[in-house]
Image: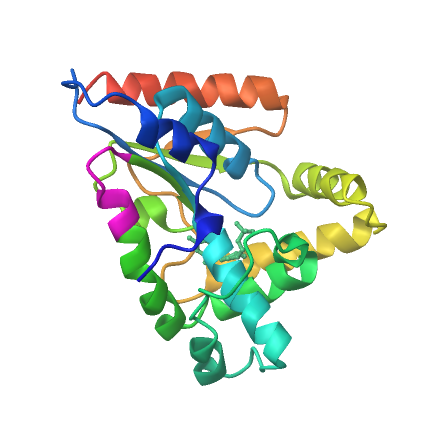
Amino acid sequence: MTEPAFIHDSANEAHSNKAKGPRVRPAPVIAVDGPAASGKGTIARALARRFDLPHMDTGMLYRAVALNLWRWGGDPAHEFEALKACDVAAVDPEDPELRSEVVGGIASRVSAYPAVRAALLDRQREFAAQPGGAVLDGRDIGTVICPDADAKLYVTASAEVRAERRLGELAARGMKVHLDDVLIDIKARDERDAGREVAPLAKAEDADLLDTSAMSVEEAVAAAILLVEKRLAKI
Ligand code: DC
């Protein structure tokens, strides 16, 4: 299956263009998990740049399924309809709706279906298995997709801090929403993502915990790089 463009970022291009010389260490797989708006995406992209690795934002796969379903008028309450929406080849990776709260909420609902998770599994595992290594971020990367990852981070922050951050992101995109509504949404998503039966959001036992509640973006990125460097020094 052709890889949809929306799961790659610029680190990918840098990666594919680099000279293929002998590597001192095997190319690493880095797993980054955490709840909504924890900053895991920013951290995963920074890690991809720092270690020159391709990056997959696995949440975008679930968001693409959700957007498909929403546009077709499908019902997220029906697993079969959600499964039909798993062919995401036609989803425009630049569609601004992919990052909307509505689509995020539907993604959280459809991602609880075993059939939907199974339909997206191979694509994520293949991405992680490429010879040059990879960074993947999501909810179940360290626990299910890449249990043998060389470095695992579980990025979190308090629900209040995450709601503030999400509010800032939405405001930057010109969306006017209330903090209370964002907080309610974040808590509902936490509950769904962590409470589902299949591949719930959870910290892998061997993951490093990074609580970014009191950190700036720069501090969080620096802390993440340090933790990963320590792990990679051991491989
Ligand atoms: O990271 P995000 O907010 O873009 O993810 C949207 C939803 O997708 C999230 O609420 C749960 C689901 N998801 C998942 O179940 N497993 C992943 N690996 C990534 C995302």
Residue at 41 percent of width and 49 percent of height: 202
Instruction: Locate the N terminus and report the quarter of the image it occupies.
Output: bottom left
Q: Is residue 112 above or below residue 204?
A: below
x, y (%) of residue 67? Answer: 58, 66
Please identify the quarter of the rendering in which residue 26 is found. top left
Residue at 30 percent of width and 23 percent of height: 18
Camera-side residue of 202 and 68: 68
140 to the left or right of 194: left
Camera-side residue of 52 and 224: 52
Q: Is residue 119 above or below residue 159?
A: below
- The answer to whether residue 19 is magenta is no
Residue at 48 percent of width and 26 percent of height: 46
Please state the extent of the stretch shown in magenta in the rendering: 126-133
x, y (%) of residue 198? Answer: 36, 65
Residue at 64 percent of width and 21 percent of height: 216
How many numbered tags mark residues here? 0
Q: Is residue 67 above or below residue 213?
A: below
- The answer to whether residue 128 is magenta is yes
